[in-house]
Image (cartoon, rainbow, N blue to C red):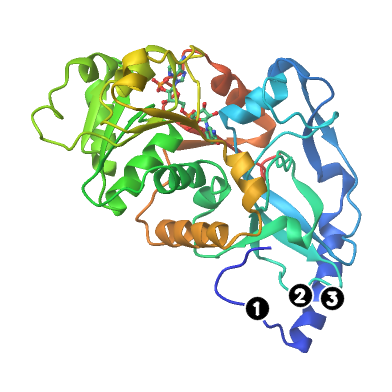
Amino acid sequence: MVMYGGKLALLTSRLVKSRLMSIREMSTAVNADCVKSLLYKEYGDPIEVLQVTTQTVEQPANDQVSVKWLLAPVNPADINTIQGKYPSRPPLPAIPGNEGVGEIVAIGSSVQTLRIGDKVVPNGPNFGTWRTLANYNFKDVMKMPSDVDLVAASMMNVNPCTAYRMLKDFVPLKPGDTVIQNGGNSAVGQLVIQLCKIWNYKSVSVVRDRPNIQELKNQLTSLGADEVLTEAEVRGTQIFKSKKLPTPRLALNCIGGQSAHEVLRHLAQDGIMVTYGGMSREPLTIPIASLIFKNISFKGFWMTAWTQANTESQEREDMFKDLATLFRDKKLQPPPHKLVPFCEYQEAISKALSFDGKTGVKYILDLTKS
Ligand code: NDP
């Protein structure tokens, strides 16, 4: 388990008190009628295969904690997982939800590092967070500092970490260097913009055109974007030739297809394009000249694989500490979002399913409203 703020040394009296509390809390928490989850028994269209079920949750075993889930985002990967189109294929039946934030409502007798009331997030992928309550081994959850906003905590594991790692792990960027990305208004893209600002990198974000494009440009600029260009604008932009901004050494590709191609054209000699999403569902076409004459490299990034390889690493602990501090200090803000009561989950799912995109917000299930 990764923790923040040093080791928690609990006094014996506190332990006793907290265990007594755990029993008291569980008597209200464990109620089969109010422990609900979404469940799918087969892969397919999420609207069709997801169903609401109720379960009984036992009191936590000695090394377990009971987590009352509070908020859980609906990410593209959650939808793809339910569809059976994602590399992670949990055994069925499965409860969806890769990330979220919950509150500990009871603890087992040997758990010393967590307390009732602590806010926690999953300590790994495919957790099944779209439910109201469940028991976990205490090592499988990670404590969040209490002063981190709940919405930020609920989406900590996926998008902020993805933005953070892609900026750290591929090109040794220096202050003043430029990063170019498409999907600049995606949740990941908005975090990339903000981290670039914090670390003094220039960012150029490409977005799809829309009737209210200036509104979107203003929003991303206010987050710290140096340039926001539509896909048509990026093709003819002179910002690099004119030396307004240094030619980018790192490109982040969330979209694929023509969008990726336009971004790629601006990469500097020996630059790297990191692909982490394929929202257009179009393949990445690589011009031969970019390989032969510019020595561009193409890499992929998958947060799940990074987490699995780094679960206990110092780098991971440092990353969560950094991100939690940045959210706490309001230097990072979560992307625009809409909380949807758990009982109205179909709204969030159908919006997330929309191939046209342009939803403008990240949908987050409010699991306290079941
Ligand atoms: P969001 O839902 O916040 O953003 C989606 C983005 O995709 C928006 O920029 C949207 O632009 C664009 N988009 C949607 N539909 C299309 C389309 N048909 N054609 C072109 N662009 C489209 O998503 P997230 O930030 O949560 O995730 C973005 C991508 O990154 C996803 O593919 C996700 O799976 C991936 N991802 C990958 C990770 C990894 O580890 N590899 C980790 C986290 C995310 P518009 O407003 O114009 O519709």
Return the x and y of residue 94 as percentages of the image width and height. Answer: 81, 32
Residue at coordinates 63% horizontally, 77% vertically from top-left?
A: 7
Contact check, label 2 and label 1, Cβ < 8 Å: yes
Return the x and y of residue 257 as percentages of the image width and height. Answer: 42, 13
Q: Earlier in the sequence, mark 2 or mark 1?
A: 1
Q: Is residue 275 visible?
A: no
For label 2, being within 8 Å of ligand 1 is answered: no
Q: Describe residue 291's horizontal placement relative to residue 279 as left or right.
A: left
Residue 249 vertical placement versus 256 (above, below): below
Q: Which residue is mark 1?
A: 8
Residue 139 vertical placement versus 334 (above, below): below
297 or 302, which lies in front?
Answer: 297
- Crowding at mark 2 (Cα within 10 Å: few <14, some 14-19, many 20+): some
86 or 243, which lies in front?
Answer: 243
Q: Which residue is mark 3?
A: 20
For label 3, being within 8 Å of ligand 1 is answered: no
- Crowding at mark 3 (Cα within 10 Å: few <14, some 14-19, many 20+): some
